[in-house]
Amino acid sequence: ELKVEQNPLFLSMQEGKNYTIYCNYSTTSDRLYWYRQDPGKSLESLFVLLSNGAVKQEGRLMASLDTKARLSTLHITAAVHDLSATYFCAGLTGTASKLTFGTGTRLQVTL
Amino acid sequence: GAVVSQHPSRVICKSGTSVKIECRSLDFQATTMFWYRQFPKKSLMLMATSNEGSKATYEQGVEKDKFLINHASLTLSTLTVTSAHPEDSSFYICSASGRANQPQHFGDGTRLSIL
């Protein structure tokens, strides 16, 4: 059974700073997703990572995948207040294509 | 892009009421739909997976008689919370996928509050 852990659970950072959110998973995952969730809202898809060494970037966010280490990272560059949200990683496994979500990282970017 | 509509967005009702939540794929055929539950400040927990025309597969610990799932067509799945109680209050989110390993597209969620 796939288990997905994220750290940190909560991250408060100042605008302009850089930081990384880590996502560790326990067994082989077919692909790794990153999502953003704003308070009271559903999920917004950010990235899907398909293979070892995959790197994707959108604006100030960059996601990477190391399948050998079973680790994905979401790097935030020069954070801005609008990035404040909860970020989830999720691994996809099995023929049923089930997603297993990480614990989530609540990011708060302060002015 | 693919759109999933979930309705209603918010429900407030008395204890003992049954509540039905609809999840529709608007511009694609969803062979598989998923139902998640999310408590405040927690992650999403998969409740069940439903495939069109067959019985839903429930995750361990989810009462299938409590949470009735129907996936009668390729564009509609419903979740009925039967005889709801305050502990069933939660944020329920559906997602839909066209084929195996295709991305899941999420609905906007339903906030259920049982008084």
Image (cartoon, rainbow, N blue to C red):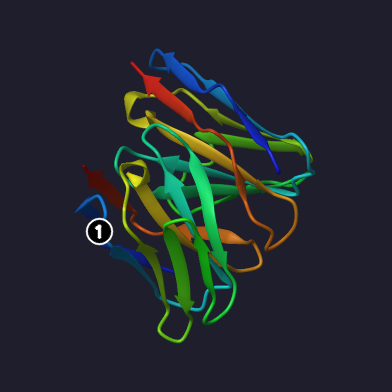
Location of residue B102 (image quadrant): bottom right
* Placement of B70 over or under B42, stated as above or below: above
Residue farthest along the bottom direction in this orientation: A68
* Placement of A98 over or under B105, stated as above or below: below
Residue A71 x, y percent position in the rendering: 40, 76
Front position in the image: B17 or B90: B90
Figure label count: 1
Q: Can see residue A1?
A: no
Say whether residue A89 is left or right of residue B8: left
* Placement of B14 over or under B24, stated as above or below: above
Residue drawn at x 50%, y 53% is B59
Q: Secondary structure at mark 1?
A: loop
* Placement of B63 over or under B23, stated as above or below: below
Front position in the image: A98 or B54: A98
Say whether residue B57 is left or right of residue A59: right
Q: Can see residue A31?
A: yes
Front position in the image: A75 or B67: A75
**Identity, as a three-letter code, of the amino acid under mark 1:** Lys
Residue drawn at x 58%, y 37% is B107
Front position in the image: B104 or A73: A73
The quarter of the rendered structure image containing the C terminus of chain A is: top left
The chain letter for the residue carrying disc 1 is A
Residue drawn at x 71%, y 61% is B100
Residue B106 x, y percent position in the rendering: 58, 42
| Residue, disc 1 | A17
Residue B3 x, y percent position in the rendering: 68, 38
Residue drawn at x 51%, y 26% is B82
Residue B115 x, y percent position in the rendering: 33, 16
